[in-house]
C-alpha cells in the first residue's frame, strides 16, 4: 500500500499537537509496512520565500498553484493508493483534494479542528465559545470580528476560502473524525454518515509507567482557549501547598499569568517550553494531568500522553476530553470532567489529588486498548483499504 500524507506544518513558534500527531502517524504507518510519501509544507518557509511567491500567499488558501504542480508530479510518478490530508492551510490549499481526484486518487482527511465552518478553526472568540458562522454560506461574523489572525482582510480571505471549498470538502472520500463530537460536526456540515469514520489519534508507547508522583501537571499552549486562567483561578481558592505542587509547561501569550502565579506561590512552578524528554520527566514527577480547555478542544494530545504514562486526567467537559477519559462510562472513567468554571474546578482538585492512585493503572489500560499505535494504525490501514482502487463513485 502506498499513501501520500499531505500536511502544512504549523510554525515551530506555535506548539502544535497536530504536527506531533502527523509525525507519529507517518512513523507508525511505516513501521506497519506502509509506503508513505510525505507531501509536507511548513509555515516556517514563508519568511524565506521569494517575493513572487509571497505575492501569491493571499490566494494560496483558495488555490496554491505551486503545491498543485508539485502534487501532480508526485501522483503521476508514484501512483499512490490514497492521499491522506491533514492541515491544508496556507500553503497547500484544499485544492489538493481536487488535484488528487483528477489523478484518480481517493482522499482521506483527518479533521483536527472546525475549519470547515470556523475561520479560526476553534469555535472560540473573545474568551468564550462562538459558533456565529455555523450554518452561514459566508462567515460574515468572522470578517467583522477579525477572527483569522486579527486581520479583517485575512479573515475575509479565509471566509471566502471556506465558502469556495464547501463543494471540495463534500467531495472527500472518507473523513476521519477524532471523536464522536467531530463526527456530529461533519454530519451537520452535510457529510453523509457513511463517509465518516471515528478513529482517535495514538501516540508512541513511552513504556512502563513510572511510579505515581505528586501534584498536578498542566502542559499546553498558554493561550486563552486552553484555560490556564481558569486553572489558576481555581488553584488560588486553596491555601498554598494544600494540593501539592502545580507544574506548568508551555508558552504563549498568557505566559505572564504562569510567571505571576509562580512568583506569588511556593506550590506553583513555571517550566517554560519542554522537549519530549522534559515532558516525560515532569509527567513522572506528577500524579494528575490537567486539561482545562475553554473551547471544544478536539483531541488534546496531552490527555493521551497522560494515560500512556498511567496518569489520570482532570479536565473540563468540553470537546474531546470526556471521550478521551471515558466519562460516558462511569465504571471505566480514568479521570474527572467538570464544567469550565473555576468553582467546579476548585472543588475537583482535592478529589483528583486523593483519587489519582486508584486510576493510574486503569488510565494506562485505556491507552493500551484504545490509543496505542498498534490499535489506531490498524484502524487507519483499514480505512485506506476500504478506498483502495479508486475514488468514491
Image (tube, rainbow, N blue to C red):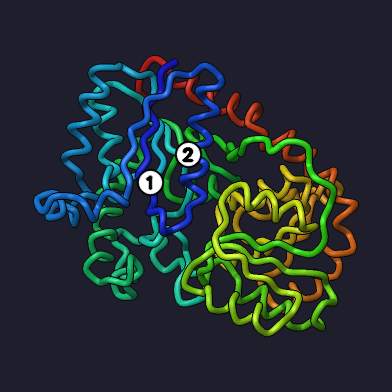
Residue found at x 19% / y 53%: 57
| Disc 2 target residue | 22
Left/right of residue 375 with respect to residue 353 in the rendered view: left
Q: Residues within 10 Å of mark 1 (few under 14, many from 20)?
A: many
Task: Look at the numbered discs 2 and 1 and tell me whether their residues touch, using CB distance below 8 Å.
Answer: yes
User: Residue 30 appears at what percent x and percent y?
Assistant: 50, 22
Sequence-wise, which precedes: disc 2 or disc 1?
1
Q: CA distance from mark 2 to mark 1?
A: 9 Å
Tally the marks.
2
With respect to residue 316, does 199 lie above or below?
Answer: above
In-front residue for pair 243/272: 272
On residue 148, the disc is none
Residue found at x 62% / y 36%: 204
Q: Quadrant of the C terminus?
A: top left
| Disc 1 target residue | 9
Callout 1: SS: strand
Residue found at x 30% / y 53%: 162
User: Residue 350 appears at what percent x and percent y?
Assistant: 85, 70
Locate residue 217: give its quadrant: bottom right
In-front residue for pair 139/249: 249
Question: Is residue 94 something that shows in the picture?
Answer: yes
Q: Residues within 10 Å of mark 2 (few under 14, many from 20)?
A: many
Amino acid at each position: 500500500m502506498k499513501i501520500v500524507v499531505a500536511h502544512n506544518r504549523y510554525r515551530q513558534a506555535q506548539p502544535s499537537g497536530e504536527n506531533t500527531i502527523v509525525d507519529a502517524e507517518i512513523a507508525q504507518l511505516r513501521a506497519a509496512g506502509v509506503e508513505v510519501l510525505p507531501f509536507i509544507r511548513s509555515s516556517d518557509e514563508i519568511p524565506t520565500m521569494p517575493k513572487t511567491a509571497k505575492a501569491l500567499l493571499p490566494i494560496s488558501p483558495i488555490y496554491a498553484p505551486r503545491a498543485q504542480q508539485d502534487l501532480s508530479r508526485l501522483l503521476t510518478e508514484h501512483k499512490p493508493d490514497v492521499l491522506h490530508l491533514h492541515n491544508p492551510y496556507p500553503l497547500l490549499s484544499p485544492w489538493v483534494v481536487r488535484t488528487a481526484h483528477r489523478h484518480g486518487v481517493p482522499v482521506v482527511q483527518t479533521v483536527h479542528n472546525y475549519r470547515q465552518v470556523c475561520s479560526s478553526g476553534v469555535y472560540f472568540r473573545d474568551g468564550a465559545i462562538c459558533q456565529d458562522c455555523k450554518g452561514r454560506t459566508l462567515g460574515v461574523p468572522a470578517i467583522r470580528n477579525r477572527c483569522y489572525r486579527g486581520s479583517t482582510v485575512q479573515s475575509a480571505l479565509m471566509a471566502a476560502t471556506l465558502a469556495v471549498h464547501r463543494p471540495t470538502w463534500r467531495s472527500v472520500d472518507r473523513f476521519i473524525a477524532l471523536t464522536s463530537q467531530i463526527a456530529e460536526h461533519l454530519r451537520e456540515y452535510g457529510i453523509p454518515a457513511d463517509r465518516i469514520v471515528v478513529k482517535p489519534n495514538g501516540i508512541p508507547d513511552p513504556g512502563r509507567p513510572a511510579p505515581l508522583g505528586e501534584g498536578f501537571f498542566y502542559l499546553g499552549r498558554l493561550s486563552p482557549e486552553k484555560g490556564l486562567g481558569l486553572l489558576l483561578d481555581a488553584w488560588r481558592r486553596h491555601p498554598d501547598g494544600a494540593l501539592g505542587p502545580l507544574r506548568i509547561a508551555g508558552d504563549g501569550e498568557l505566559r505572564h499569568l504562569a510567571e505571576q502565579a509562580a512568583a506569588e506561590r511556593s506550590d506553583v512552578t513555571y517550566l517554560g517550553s519542554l522537549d519530549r524528554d522534559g515532558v516525560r520527566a515532569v509527567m513522572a514527577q506528577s500524579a494528575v494531568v490537567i486539561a482545562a480547555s475553554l473551547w471544544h478542544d478536539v483531541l488534546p494530545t496531552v490527555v493521551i500522553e497522560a494515560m500512556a504514562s498511567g496518569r489520570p486526567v482532570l479536565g473540563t467537559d468540553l470537546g474531546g476530553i470526556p471521550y478521551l477519559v471515558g466519562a460516558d462510562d462511569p465504571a471505566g472513567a480514568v479521570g474527572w470532567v467538570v464544567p469550565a468554571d473555576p468553582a467546579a474546578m476548585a472543588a475537583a482538585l482535592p478529589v483528583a489529588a486523593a483519587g489519582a492512585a486508584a486510576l493510574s493503572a486503569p488510565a494506562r489500560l485505556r491507552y493500551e486498548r484504545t490509543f496505542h499505535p498498534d490499535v489506531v494504525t490498524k484502524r487507519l490501514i483499514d480505512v485506506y483499504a476500504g478506498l483502495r482502487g479508486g475514488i468514491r463513485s
